[in-house]
Amino acid sequence: MGLTAYRYCLFMLLVGCMLVALSPVVSSPAFAQKAETEGQGDGLVSRSDTDTSSDLEPLDPDKPLAELPDFGVEWPELDAPTPGSPAPEEPAVDTARDVEMDRRLAEEEISEIEDQDIRAEAEAELEQGIAASFQPGDSLAERRYELEFNGLPDNLSTMFNQRFQALSALEEYRGDEANFAQIKRRAETDRELVERLLRIEGYYDAIVRNSFAAGRGTDIDVTIAVTAGPQYQLDAITLNGLEQAGGSDAEKFRNAFGLQSDDIINSDRIMEARARLDEEMAENGYAFAETAEPELTVDHAERNGDLDIVVTPGKKYVFGSILMNDTELFSADHAELIARFDAGDLYQQSEVQDLRRALIATGLVSTVTLEPVAAGDEEGVVDIAASVTAAPLRTISGAIGYGTGEGLRSEVSWEHRNLFPPEGLIRLTGVLATQEQSGSITYRRNNFRRRDNVLNGQVALSNVDNSAFEARTFSVSASLERQSNLIFQKKWNWSAGIELLASQERDIDGNIQTTSRDTFFIGSLPLTLAYDGSDNLLDPTSGFRLSARLAPEASLQSGSFFYARSQIDGSAYYPVSDKIVLAGRARLGSIVGAGSNRIAPSRRLYSGGGGSVRGFGFQRIGPRDVNNDPSGGRSLVEFSLEARVRVDAFGGNFGVVPFIDAGNVYTNSLPDFTGLRFGTGLGLRYYSDFGPIRVDVGTPINPQEGDSRIAVYVSLGQAF
């Protein structure tokens, strides 16, 4: 009887052990529900399959226990903390534990330290802490630490490092002193973070361990060691519902999705593929197309996964009308004039986004919401409902600058951007400077009769008194133009206009060398054409620009005569590296049809200054009169070369710019490139959010008599 009872107990013990061993692969309804719901809302739902086939590898008693199937991919917050946001909180110490529990925890942590010296010191500090009424977190002295990785795969995307830097507890508190318990908690948090980030890259079997060793002095070296394992691949890819779009469209959308079987499972690429699919449908008339969150079923035994996405294309639409909720700023008709699409065109989401940017560019609205709504009375037609919030329409602004030879210059202006709706701007401007005093009234209407056309009109009165000439001028001008702005940088720009002016100017007669004051009545028809192939309006780093200006003019002064002023400008930008850009500029100018002594001094060509040849004073290069003042000429040539070097100090917002410029002005109508004046120097740049702020200090290499040895220029934007 005793033997039978013994055998019965042994049998039950074996059965119990088998049940315990099999329990990780037994599923229950509650566990299955977790597998289906965990991770939703983060963009990707992940499931795992359990394989009980006989192909499993034999058990290795020395191999670490495998983790439970990853039924929910825990997504980290993918966006780095925004400036000014609160820093992640330090993992909290559980102050509710009693002293005995803390002591045991500290002993366990100390026993894992590989370095004997650190372990002995830690044990001594622990005993001292116990004698002094041990408190949580006081088991070790304060130390600093260094972090390194070991075994990270070489093919990780740049997002891995960016996310780790943004979310890492060790990186957040790097440089701060902490005891070993705190360092270990941070390392454990980061170990889990690395596992999640590796799963995003397809490494579902990665093993991540932490180790600690003595560093320099009392520092601790923290190593996150990674055994990545294989990357899982996609197996079956199912886009349920895509066939509703029709044969040719469905095939186009599938190709746009891009992912194929045997591609590496990468969560970022899956979300990018989903975004491409959404964009392709929205660009081909499917205004209300939707895609559900991707669902990934991971098979750890086969090391692959099945991807399922439910797609609802809906109907295909064409554009209808634009509906405005508020017509105080402008009407729906004006919005339709700005839009690049017409009623009946195939719906495209990019055209809707372009309209949104164009409405923002008017300066009249601060926020714009554009939503497609199905037209109630027309099948297959979608209207665009526009909801706008008005921006402040009045602005007072000011500017101040300084240039050697020009002196101080201050400007103040007031404008109302919609005084004459729609988009009718009035601007009042006043200038008070060392060598200039002026006032003007400007009228400007954006999107005049068609998108991007700008109508300008101006009335101005000015008094200019510099070393080259003295002029009191009244002018009236008007023009029609198509120019770039900070939101839309256009490749081609042009303008055509008319200018009428009356000017009383001081001049020196070249024959008898006497000063005279003459009145000029001038009519001009300025024309410009420009191509902008650069990558940025205010701070270009690559590409080139070309522009040409022609202005036929008629002058009434001691009889009438005609002449033409022309100028060609070109600049190029070449990135040597991420930190260095080489920039070059050339300018040629010419006046034909009249001699210098007949042309008003203010209409002649001059060179020198911050936007010309740096190192020389404003307009100081070229022919001089008997008073050693510049007299201008009928042709000019200028060249500039500079290296724009950004420095890493001060957050990378500063740069230095060594430069060399050259140029000259000639009395003939064509330049002969002789007697070039050279200037060189060094500039400082501060790269603000609205463009670089420029400070250039130059010196002339071969100055003329009376030229200053140092010239300083301050302005917004690069020199060219």
Image (tube, rainbow, N blue to C red):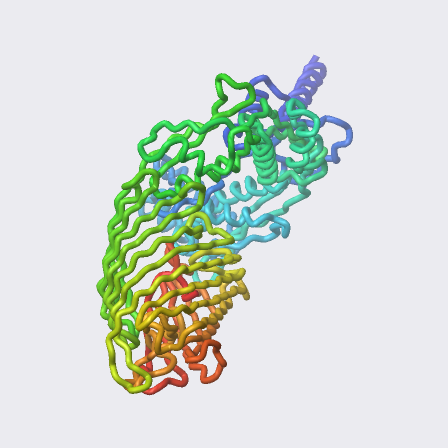
Q: Quadrant of the N terminus?
A: top right
Q: Residue furthest right?
A: 54
Image location (x, y in percent) of residue 110: 47, 48
Q: Residue at x 44, y 37 (%)?
A: 337
Residue 708 falls in image quadrant: bottom left
Residue 657 falls in image quadrant: bottom left
Q: Residue at x 71, y 33 (%)?
A: 235
Q: Residue at x 26, y 44 (%)?
A: 394
Image location (x, y in percent) of residue 678: 43, 80
Report whether 139 appears left or right of 270. left
Q: Nearer the viewer, residue 529 or 571?
A: 529
Viewer can see residue 616 = no
Viewer can see residue 715 = yes
Q: Is residue 569 above or below residue 492?
A: below
Q: Is residue 538 above or below residue 250?
A: below
Q: Is residue 566 above or below residue 77?
A: below
Report whether 91 appears left or right of 9. left
Q: Quadrant of the C terminus?
A: bottom left
Q: Nearer the viewer, residue 568 or 213?
A: 568
Q: Residue furthest top?
A: 1
Circle count: 0
Image location (x, y in percent) of residue 446: 38, 45
Image location (x, y in percent) of residue 480: 41, 51
Residue 280 falls in image quadrant: top right
